[in-house]
Amino acid sequence: MKTGKVFLVGAGPGDPKLITIKGMEAIKEADLIVYDYLANKSLLSHGKEGAEIVYVGKMGGRHTLSQEKINELIVKRAKKGKVVARLKGGDPFIFGRGGEEAEELAEAGIPFEIIPGVTAAIACPAYAGIPLTHRDYTSTVAFITGHEDPTKEDSSIAWEKISTGAGTLVFLMGMSNLPEIVKNLQRCGRDPMTPVALIRWGTRPDQKTVVGTLGDIIDKAKKHALAPPVIIVVGEVVNLRKRLNWFEGKPLFGRKIIVTRAREQASDFVELLYLNGAEPIEFPTIQVIPPDSWDELDKAVDEIRGFEWIIFTSINGVRFFFERLNRKGDLRLLYGIKICAIGPQTASEIQRYGLAPDLIPKEYRAEAIIEEMGREDIAGKRMLLPRAEIAREILPQELSRMGARIKVVTAYKTIKPEEDLERVRELLKNKEISVITFTSSSTVKNFLEMFNKGEVMGLIDGTAVACIGPITAKTAEDLGIRTDIMPSKYTMPELTEAIVTYFSKRGI
């Protein structure tokens, strides 16, 4: 059997966007992904279909697998011809035991590659607004393991030299040893007034930074109940954080926001929230799937030359329609047919297929389409409406009343997905969620149905509710849920901006 290959991949410090391009390519190629505690789990979603995923995390002295067992696992699978991606938090060669794993692979004759990663040693201080070197402060920096017991007789740390030998000291995995680290630095000549920063979960939306001095940082760490993983930065450069703290100053920093939109449509919204510093919690209450039968939509596509208008009221309607159209013919079948899109996002999806909508109402809802169509001569005109299996009937009813000959076909259906309900319930119960977002009436209804009857009102008490528009807000109101946030334009960017404005006005 052909021998496989192992990629020792630096997964970065926590922010999944800090993975390297080469690291991402290895994840996508792997038959087996072996990841540890500090590797962001969202990276696993980029693995190919059917890839095996194994967690080997070590936390607080508790090992899922010993290092020997991890070595044995990756060697054994590679010998069976598998491509293995070994995801390691930060960089594999900066206190990541990557060198030991590489030695095992070399000894076993397994081909391997080292893919460096962005180490937490530089990334976490950067996200806390602390440059490790600065011309006006220091030109030297040292990285030290904080995991080693500083009191042991055969310590490999030369405290007498390191304490004052570098301008900036960065300790990784040192939170449990903080008192001894502080004691040894002062014992060996470091000024008790030297600034210190403790950065927990650096580069992530839940990053927390505590600043003090060697003289008071232990008390401050206790006051803030800091627990690992923490990066410790010692040096005058810590003072620059006052001016350079860019990440924690984002408008939605530290806020957990539930996104109930279908997963295949949520990426843009999740990205907008992320860019504003929030931690999006994807909890889709809708899953978009094909209809039970394509017959209805396929028949409409076969008869497409008989229509004068096609009305799209969602991105999903566009996608499924063009999927079936491409099976039957191509865009030339739509020559001369006018197209209506309910809003700019739907219009943007249509434009991906090389077409420009003829009509986009000023207000992005069915009533606005009716109003715009009222200005057209639509009596006797044949219209096609590809939409969800269950949808509001006002549009076809009103257009029919105006004389249009409208054909409604099911292009897709929505169902309630199986999601991590217990995690969301616990977050709501602990009042860790800042906002719940709803982007359609179905997301509201399904959200309520996923919990026990009468449970939701107590769970969301004190949590802001954001609705994409008045129809969704009306559904929420009818079900007993108030709406705190609603944009003037019913798009994801506007909804994000409305959430930012809501918190900025309250100064919280």
Image: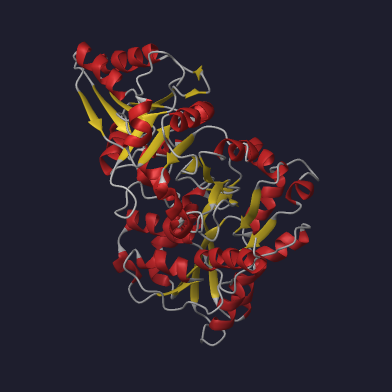
Q: Can residue 309 be spotted in the picture?
A: yes
Pinpoint residue 319: horizontal percent, then vertical percent. 42, 57
198 relative to 291, above or below? above
Residue 174 drawn at (x, y percent): 47, 29
Q: Is residue 54 above or below residue 315?
A: above
Residue drawn at x 24%, y 30% is 114
Residue 264 screen position, x and y as percent? 47, 50
Q: Which quadrant holds residue 332?
A: bottom left
Q: Depth check: 167 or 414 in front?
A: 167
Residue at image point 42% right, 38% down: 45
Asked whether 346 or 310 is in front, the reply is 346
**Which quarter of the figure has residue 86?**
top left
Placement of the N terminus among the 4 image quadrants: top left
How many labels sit on residues?
A: 0
Which of the image's four quarters has the C terminus? bottom right
Above or below, comparing residue 465 to residue 382 in the picture: above
Work out whether residue 209 can be spotted. Answer: no
Q: In the drawing, does residue 282 fall left or right of residue 15?
A: right
